[in-house]
Image: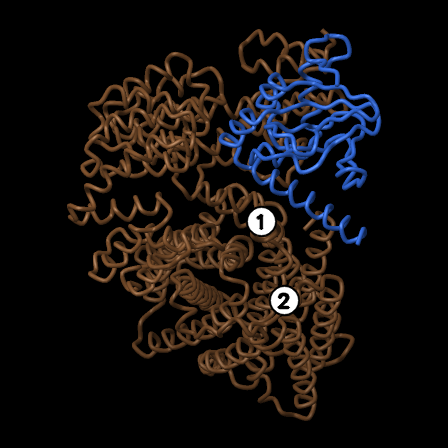
Amino acid sequence: MTDVSQASAGSLGLVERVAALHRVELFAGIPGRVLAAVAEAGVEKRLAVGELLMEEGAVEAHLYAVVEGRVKVHRGDRTLVELGPGATVGELAVLVPAPRAASVTALEPTLVLRVDQAVLDELLIDWPELAHGVISELVSRLRATTEFADQAS
Amino acid sequence: MSDTPERGVVALLTAQALAFGVMLALVVVPANALFLDAYGAKWLPATYIAIAVFGTGASALIARAARHTRLVRVAAASLFGIAVLYAASWLILVAGGVWVSAALLVLFPIALQLGFVFIGGQAGRLLDVRQMKERFPRVVGGFSVGFFLGGLLAIPLLALLGSTEDLLLGTTVAQLAFLALLLETERRFPEVRSAPIGTSQDTARPSARTLFASGLVLLLLVYQVLSAMGSWLVDYLLFNRAGAHYSGDDLTRFLSGYTAVLNLVDILFLALLAGPLLRRFGLRLGLVLNPAVVAALLAVMAVVVAGPGAAAYGLFVLAAVTRLTDIVLSDGTTRTSVNASFQVVPIEDRLAVQAVVEGIGVPVAIGATGAVLLLMNLLGLGIGAVIVFGAVLSVIWTVSGAAMYRSYTRALGDEMRRRSLVASAYDVTEDDVALQALLRSDDARDVRLGLDLLPGIASLASTEALRQASEHADPELRLRALVQLAADGDAQAAGEVQALATDLARSPDAAERRAAASALGPRRIVTAGQSMLIALLDDADPTVRAAALDSVIPADAGERDVVRRVVAALEEPRTAGSATAAVRRLADSAVPLVAAALARGGAKRPTLVRAAANAATEHGLAVIEPALRDRDRVVVLAALEALDAAHAAGVVPPDVLDGVFGDAAAHASRTLAARAALAGSDLPLRRALEDERDLARRLVIAVLALRHGDRVRDAVRVVDAAEGQRRALGVEALDVLLSREEATIALPLVRRDLTPEEQAAALRHVVPAERGLGEWIADIADDPEGVWRSSWLALCARHASGR
């Protein structure tokens, strides 16, 4: 995994980061001036094909917003869902710190932005409507998982 | 409703009104001519009484039918029935039965009222209150044109058909055209078929008493009755004076010429003035203008009678002007305003109320006018008495219009407050048995709920249940039950609380430390509470700190260590809510620290601003002033919203609110103009400008909420969340609540159904600025005049310019 937050080459400027966050459903309604602080605190990560972003069972307190590329959420060899730009992964851990329920691996060269729990906590205080976005995101993820389980059985 | 269907609706309703007008003109001419020829004017008052009796009956039938059948079916059946009556009248007249002309005279005002009930009812379902105010005068204009055309048509038709009776064939055809247009409206706009109440299983049928318990409905009835009485008196005055000055063919020529002028002025007023007048001044003017002008003209007439006398030509001219004014204003402002007022009545009651108010109220008013005139004639009172009576009646009518407007604004406010989730008060003291069952349960969740509900209940049985809960396996529940027992005077429990709280405060388990922190509220029970509180306020776990903050009491105000920690907790997101509440309890002692934190630049923290706003309710403007004067509009907004939430509107001087409002209006105007120039260019900058527009919108709403109270937020909530008619009601509620100057700025900003381009056009007058793309970007990036005041916006502008 390559942490490009300190490398200037290939890294996004603040405006691009905010624009990327605005494309994420969860943050679409938050004003850019507020997201600028989130983007500043965020950490960019570039993943190569097949590189692991999150590992099932790991205890972490941050979510990732997919800026470019594509990732799969999987348990072992079983793919639960594939996600592209504008999606988020790991929201549950930010809300309720617990071992990751699934792993996430890049399917193609991927750029993600990491948002830590403390940042999201602060956003939730000032922008309660964000909680609605979190709930919607979780529900759609649950639906996708249930559909997947139905198809598999 | 988008613009195209709205145009289609207005076109069809106008066509209906046109056919309706032609029909009425073709019935009024033969009915009057045949009746007066056969029976003379002396029997006219009798027809007034008949109008009252049959009009009331017909309206009651329509209202009853409307509760069980769709509006369009009721309307179609009524229009068809009246067409059959016209055809039958023609047959009876041809057969020599001239008595039917009396029936036609009675039918005329009933058909007039019902026609407007049906057209107004359709408009109420297809147009929202804003569209109604703007477009309904055009629909009424169709009626005036129809009436004018019908009068013109009568002469060639008479020549073509050969006799006055045969004009009723034309009446029947026009009535059938009205019916066909109504059915076409239903076909093209099926939403006009709102279900009648009678078909809904959930809705109980409201009685007439229930309907008229509403102040607005009652005032609508009073207003309409007075309006009809005033209009018929004015009619009488004109015909009385015309009869005194002309006779024979001269009288006919005068009436023809007068009617032509009247209809022409009416059409011009409806086409050119009525809509803009109502848009500019709203229902406030629409309801009062007609009666006030009529009252003034009648007062002048009374002076003329007292001076030159009843025979003066000036009195005749004034009578003609008064009738013209009454008809023009009735069609142009009154009818539209009354129809718009009905929009606040729930849709399921609207047609019934409208049918009763317009269909029963008006015929009764006509009957009453006839009775008054008969009585005056019997008593030998002259025209002067009629004028004085009319003037007094018009003053009362004006007052009822003003009262109706107030009632309308109140009803709008009530409608805005209507919420689907309403908290109702409950009394747990009546559920002592259920409470004991909760406290004795094995399930910890039941016991926790029982303890939550317990305060205030001190029955013997619940004390026993509490003792049982104090032995629960869960230490948190055990402690809470012991605290409750100790608070009720149990000395043994107090001792156990002391020991258990001390143990739990040292526990490695955060849940147990949280339980200890929660037990510190009633401090007299835990003697070592102060030191324990400070330790728990410093706990590593934010949930424990929040619980300790919840246990801060007014008596802690003298403890600097506690106060300092409480104010510091305002800056920590997870404890900010509890800290804000604790600051409120600490009152005076926390204020200097909060003010100092704000002044240090902490104004960027909304939680600090909220705490300062709460403190401002007691300590005045100085505490919150640093935030209100901040250059950053986000901080100003946080301060205004916090002051509103803390019910501290009185703290902010009007000039501060004026300054914020003016700045927000200018910022919105500038932002929308820049965004319009940037259309299709750099996306982040456009988005940043949209965020600034939203910020200006929130600032405007915050200022208005502080100026006018919760009603502003209620209306904005409706505008934001509702669609169609209800959203339009929300905009209307704001329109009646705000001053003209406020509404000019606020309405375009609040309405989310407007495009940014439409908003920009509506606010262009605030900061007129025509700039090119490059100029806007440079201005935002460099901000030479210090008007943008946003580092993020400047960054986006620099990004857009490639700097």
Direction from residue B289 to residue A3 in the image, left or right: right
Which chain shows up in blue?
A
Image quarter for residue B682?
A: top right
In the structure shown, which secondary structural element does the residue marked by tag 1 occupy? loop
Q: Which amino acid, by three-letter code, is at mark 1? A: Ala
User: Which residue occupies 25% across, 46% down?
Assistant: B482
Viewer-side label of 1, 2: 1
Does B614 sit above or below residue B397? above
Say which chain tag 1 marks. Answer: B
Residue A59: percent from the left, percent from the top?
61, 30
x, y percent for residue B107: 57, 79
Q: Upstream in the sequence, badge 1 or badge 2?
A: 2
Question: Considering depth in this image, is B497 or B360 the residue closer to the camera?
Answer: B497
Residue B561, horizontal then vertical, whole percent: 27, 20
Q: Is residue B200 visible?
A: yes
The percent coordinates of residue A65 (x first, y second) are: 69, 28
B184 lies left or right of B223: right
Write down the residue under mark 2.
Answer: B194
The one of B122 and B447 positioned closer to us in this rendering: B447
B58 to B312, vertically: above or below: below
> Is B350 above or below relative to B702?
below
Chain shaded brown: B
Name the residue that disc number 1 marks: B722
Q: Chain of mark 2?
A: B
Q: Which class describes the residues within 10 Å of circle 1: few (<14), some (14-19), or many (20+)? A: some
The answer to which quarter of the image holds residue B371 is: bottom left
Q: Report the number of numbered marks.
A: 2
